[in-house]
């Protein structure tokens, strides 16, 4: 589930018959879902056993992108994009069981990509967008661990390059699109107790967005 908020700041300069349009896009979205967890749990003695449960996700994100129409070719308009964004989400392991805990994640990143647009008629525009995500800050707060007297842990996973792709249609003030997003996190250092760390991990989101431009 997501939503787009677009604020255009049009600055036009004329050179012969070519126009260059610069604009800023502010996008805010929310997301939620539940997935199967197929892994393992361990006790204080270090023994592990297979474990299956449900893991719930929910969070918010936002981006600010600067873009301009670089050129047109074959009915397509090419828009390079640069900007920054952030995401904050809760990951609840073992929603209905007694072996889980809560992870609060925050990642902030730069964005560099390209957007293609084509006029579909009747005030509609088809678009295709791809971008790399360059994180510069990651934070993970783990709560309700309940292991060996430890309740909460603070970690900072290493930053790794991610990427995203999106395709859809803009119809007047409405936007509908399908998207794919991949984020990767490197292994963190040990926490202050010297016992906990976040191993290499990744998150993939695939879905459909529906939004409105304001």
Image (cartoon, rainbow, N blue to C red):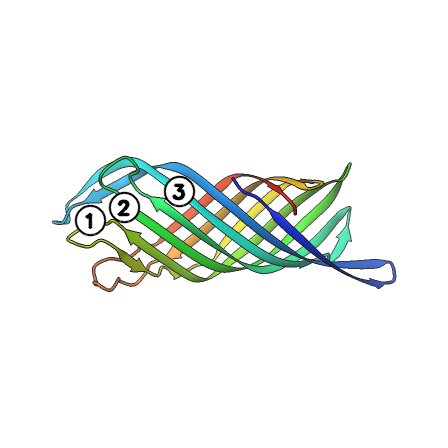
For the point 24% across and 57% down, the residue is 196
Q: Secondary structure at mark 3?
A: strand
How far apart in space, not on screen, are marks 1 and 3 (Cα)? 21 Å
Q: Observer-nearest residue: 25 or 129?
A: 25
Tell me: 70 left or right of 107.
right
Q: Is residue 164 above or below residue 209?
A: below
For the point 58% across and 60% down, the residue is 83
**Mark 1 vs 2, N-terminal side:** 2
For the point 32% across and 38% down, the residue is 37
**Mark 1 vs 3, N-terminal side:** 3
Measured as percent of width and height from the top left, residue 19 is found at: 81, 58
Q: Secondary structure at mark 1?
A: loop
How far apart in space, not on screen, are marks 2 and 3 (Cα)? 12 Å
Q: Are marks 1 and 3 in contact (CB under 8 Å)?
A: no
Q: Are marks 1 and 2 in contact (CB under 8 Å)?
A: yes
Q: Observer-nearest residue: 28 or 99?
A: 28
Judging by the rendered image, the residue that carries numbered circle 3 is 57
Mark yes or no: residue 199 visible: no
Q: Secondary structure at mark 2?
A: loop
How far apart in space, not on screen, are marks 1 and 2 (Cα)? 8 Å
Measured as percent of width and height from the top left, residue 23 is found at: 69, 57
Judging by the rendered image, the residue that carries numbered circle 1 is 146
Judging by the rendered image, the residue that carries numbered circle 2 is 101
Q: Is residue 40 above or below residue 200?
A: above
């Amino acid at each position: 589930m997501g939503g787009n908020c677009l604020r255009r700041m049009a600055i036009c300069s004329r050179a012969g018959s070519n126009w260059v349009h610069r604009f800023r896009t502010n996008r805010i979205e929310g997301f939620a879902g539940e997935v199967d967890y197929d892994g393992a749990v361990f006790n204080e003695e270090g023994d592990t056993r297979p474990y299956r449960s449900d893991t719930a996700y929910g969070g918010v994100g936002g981006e600010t992108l600067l873009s301009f129409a670089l050129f047109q070719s074959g009915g397509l308009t090419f828009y390079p994009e640069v900007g920054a964004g952030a995401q904050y989400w809760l990951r609840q392991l073992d929603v209905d069981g007694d072996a889980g805990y809560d992870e609060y994640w925050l990642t902030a990143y730069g964005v560099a990509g390209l957007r293609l647009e084509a006029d579909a008629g009747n005030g509609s525009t088809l678009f295709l967008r791809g971008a790399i995500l360059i994180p510069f800050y990651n934070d993970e707060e783990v709560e309700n661990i309940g292991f060996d007297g430890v309740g909460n842990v603070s970690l900072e996973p290493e930053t790794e390059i991610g990427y995203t792709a999106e395709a859809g249609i803009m119809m007047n003030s409405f936007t509908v699109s399908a998207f794919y997003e991949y984020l990767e996190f490197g292994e963190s250092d040990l926490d202050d107790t010297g016992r906990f760390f976040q191993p290499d991990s990744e998150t993939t989101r695939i879905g459909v967005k529906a939004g409105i431009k304001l």
